[in-house]
Image (cartoon, rainbow, N blue to C red):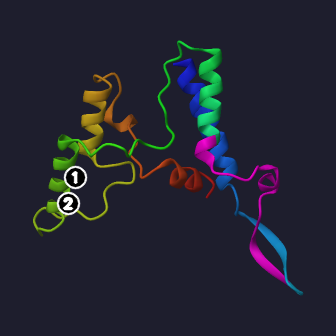
Amino acid sequence: VQTIMVMMKTIVALAMLASASAFLPSTRRASRHTVSMAVERNPNFAKLQAGYLFPEIARRRNAHLEKNPDADIISLGIGDTTQPIPDHILSGLSGAAAELGVKETYNGYGAEQGKATLREKIASKLYNDKIKPEEVFVSDGAKCDIARLQM
């Protein structure tokens, strides 16, 4: 659990640095003219090395594993796209998409914390009812969530 928390904190910190761009007033020079913008570039961007976030996460994960070979890490980096989508996931996606095509089952946008039935399944199946469905948050991804936290 401690290893997971260390990796999660690293990922969140890196993602926040990478996405913490634009919520302060700014003035930038564009060619000969001064352009005043409502947002200022976060000065932490100047501290970032050029490159993509996920290779840095992988580098830090591997360095951590070298020091802690028995660490049980849950990777929150890039997913594995080398295998087909498993049938049970594909059928769930297909079924949910089909529901959107029928007036009686169409539900549009779900609750901001995720569909209640999905949160219930996650709480019971993944956490053996050790947490309540109200404690589960389903999102469309960390980048979006981190950006929303800044608002």
Few, some or many residues within 10 Å of mark 2 (<14, 14–19, 20+): few
**Image check: 34 left or right of 103?**
right
As for residue 139 lying within the magenta part, the answer is no
Q: CA distance from mark 1 to mark 2?
A: 6 Å
Question: Eyeballing the image, is 34 above or below 148?
Answer: below
Q: Residue furthest top?
A: 70
Which disc is residue 93 wearing?
Answer: 1
In terms of secondary structure, where does tag 2 sit? helix
Number of residues whose C-alpha sits closer than 10 Å to that of mark 1, classed few (under 14), some (14–19) or many (20 or more): few
Q: Residue at x 23, y 41 (%)?
A: 86
Look at label 2 and name its amino acid. Ala
Q: What residue span does the magenta drawing correspond to?
A: 34-55
Check if residue 36 falls in the magenta segment: yes
Circles 1 and 2, Cβ within 8 Å, touching? The answer is yes
Residue lying farthest to the front in this orientation: 82
x, y (%) of residue 99?
A: 15, 60
Question: Which sits in the foreground, 96 or 75?
Answer: 75
* Quadrant of the image occupied by residue 112: bottom left
